Image (tube, rainbow, N blue to C red):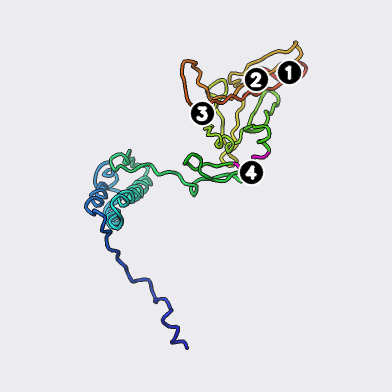
Amino acid sequence: LPGRFRKFFSPPSCQVLYSDTPNNTTNCNITTEHCNLLMQAPFTDCHSQVDPAPYITACAETSCKFPTEEGLALSCQFFDAYAKTCGLNPNITLGDWRSPTVCPVPLVSCMEMYCSHNEFCDENNGEPHCLCRALFAAKYTPTNSLGNPAVCMGSSATLTLAGCLLSAKNIDYTTLHLLDESCKGHMDNETHMVTFSFDCSNTCGTEIMSINGSQIIYQNTITMQNGSADIITRQKQVIIDFSCLYTVPDLTSVSF
């Protein structure tokens, strides 16, 4: 009985090497010539530290097994691997190697994206984004808001927006700012919430208004509009006003 099943056993080792024949639609001369660009600038700046020969050999042998167009695209992975290895040495700066090799910057995939526990990764306009989970977005949807109400405390005010809500509307948070364009939002690396704030040390263009002498409002605006009215842009416009209201007796600790 054991003899009947012996033929199903795996070989005792994995030392058997297999060699694939080149694809008959591949011009190996073209792909090999492309791989040999590792011998030229700007890669030459790294040759004394990292031998390009193994990369060229692997590049040529691998890319030759695919149709020419796919092989050329695949060879870019070997250029990238060599560049990253060179980058481990802080004294080596390769500069732009993608232009001479005609290798595009690879698109980020969801596998490389970090999303918070309130988000999931999906494509939006062909690019991966962290989008809001339905349960998280549900509390903002009824009011069509992009985040939480303003928090007023002493001489400061803070407004927090959800990064995933901004992404859903194709709004890049880095383009947003307060009335003072130097006051931009800060995204928390873990929660992806974007916070805008002002206080007495940095008013960020805050406007102060008095109501009947008994109340004072400190108001600011999150916007992405350019300060010049002469510039016409096709970007989505964002205007989010937020304010803090204080009665006069409460202003003893507030000074702008």
Give the numbered dot on residue 175: 3
Answer with mark 3 or mark 2, whichever residue precedes in sequence.
3
Q: Secondary structure at mark 2?
A: strand
Mark nearest the camera among 2 and 1 is: 2
Distance between mark 1 and mark 3 Cα atoms: 33 Å
Answer with mark 2 or mark 1, whichever residue precedes in sequence.
2
Please tell me in which quadrant of the rendered image residue 209 appears.
top right
Tell me what residue is drawn at x 29 percent, y 65 percent: 19
| Range of residues picked out in magenta | 132-138
Q: Where does residue 179 sit, x and y in percent of width and height?
A: 57, 20
The amino acid type found where label 3 is placed reads: Thr
Q: Secondary structure at mark 4?
A: helix
Answer with mark 4 or mark 1, whichever residue precedes in sequence.
4
Are discs 1 and 3 less than 8 Å apart at CB? no
Distance between mark 4 and mark 1 Cα atoms: 41 Å
Distance between mark 2 and mark 1 Cα atoms: 15 Å
Residue under label 1: 251
133 part of magenta stretch? yes
Distance between mark 4 and mark 2 Cα atoms: 32 Å
How packed mark 3 is, by other alpha carbons closer than 10 Å (few <14, some 14-19, many 20 or more), is some
Residue under label 4: 134
Give the numbered dot on residue 219: 2
Are discs 3 and 4 less than 8 Å apart at CB? no
